[in-house]
Image: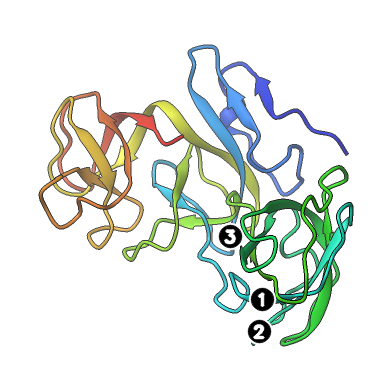
């Protein structure tokens, strides 16, 4: 099935949610005023509007250094051996396989799907229709699996687990699909004091799903910057008007 990578819609479309998948994950929705959103699927816990969400944490036994079978140029699949955690069928569909060490290292391929793979078992990862192996792989190649960053997104926890991907425009039920905002004016949960016109970052250890002032000389200077305060300064636990610039 082919999907458009960007769609243009009227106001209100960004608040549509549901259990059926209508777009490719990561599809961009642009409103008439230039605000942008990306299509995402919630993880096992519902998402609240106005709270920063992040990509799911990678699975430690899947994320790198997987023994990889030889694959010739033009191959449409890559076989890997998992470590101590099984992978359900199509867990990595719409995600990526990348080579991280030795022969053929430095490549990334889009995943179409795969069968279930047992813990410590081997399985073929089917590549997207036109994304064939470009550089031959050997039995010394090591690879990693990464889910689509918009699949199974979670409220950004107090310990940062992955990249911030957006802010839900409305509540999204567990395992349902919806839109998370990446650009433009948004109402976002605040922790602490933020200042009009100054940058904000993910709150990290302070409050899950919140943003706070970016202190480039402080303890959070390495956390992801997500936008700029645009409205009246809000008190902590309120929602501030900010201009998002996540991607």
Q: Earlier in the sequence, mark 1 or mark 3?
A: 3
The residue that mark 3 highlights is 43
Between disc 2 and disc 3, the foreground one is 2
Look at the numbered disc 3 and give the secondary structure of its residue: loop
Residue at image x 72%, y 86%?
119
* Residue 69 figure quarter: bottom right
Residue at image x 61%, y 55%?
106
Question: Residue 170 at x, y = what percent?
Answer: 50, 39
> Is 213 left, or right, of 81 in this rendering?
left
Q: Are marks 2 and 1 in contact (CB under 8 Å)?
A: yes
Q: Give neighbour class at mark 2: few <14, some 14-19, many 20+ (Cα, 10 Å).
A: some
The residue that mark 2 highlights is 83
Q: Give neighbour class at mark 3: few <14, some 14-19, many 20+ (Cα, 10 Å).
A: many
Question: Residue 169 at x, y = what percent?
Answer: 49, 36
Asked if residue 84 is positioned above or below residue 110 in the image, the reply reads: below
Residue at image x 79%, y 33%?
3
> Is 81 left, or right, of 145 in this rendering?
right
Look at the numbered disc 1 and give the secondary structure of its residue: strand
């Amino acid at each position: 099935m082919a999907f458009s990578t960007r769609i243009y819609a009227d106001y209100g479309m960004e608040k549509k949610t549901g259990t059926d998948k209508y777009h490719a994950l990561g599809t961009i929705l642009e409103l008439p005023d230039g605000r942008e959103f990306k299509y995402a699927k919630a993880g096992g816990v519902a998402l609240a509007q106005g709270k920063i969400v992040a990509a799911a944490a990678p699975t430690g036994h899947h994320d790198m250094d997987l023994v990889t079978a030889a694959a010739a140029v033009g191959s449409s699949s890559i076989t890997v051996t998992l470590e101590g955690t099984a992978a359900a069928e199509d867990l990595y569909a719409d995600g990526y396989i990348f080579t991280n060490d030795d022969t053929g290292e430095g490549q990334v391929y889009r995943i179409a799907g795969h069968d279930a793979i047992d813990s410590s078992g081997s399985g073929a990862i089917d590549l997207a229709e036109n994304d064939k192996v470009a550089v031959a792989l050997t039995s010394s190649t090591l690879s990693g699996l990464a889910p689509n960053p918009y699949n199974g997104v979670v409220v950004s926890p107090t310990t940062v687990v992955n990249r911030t991907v957006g802010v839900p425009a409305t509540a999204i039920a567990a395992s349902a699909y919806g839109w998370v905002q990446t650009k433009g004016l948004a109402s976002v949960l605040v922790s602490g004091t933020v200042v009009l016109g100054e940058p904000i970052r993910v709150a990290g250890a302070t409050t899950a799903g919140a943003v706070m002032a970016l202190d480039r000389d402080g303890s959070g200077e390495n956390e992801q910057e997500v936008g700029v305060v645009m409205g009246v300064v809000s008190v902590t636990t309120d929602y501030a008007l900010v201009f998002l610039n996540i991607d």
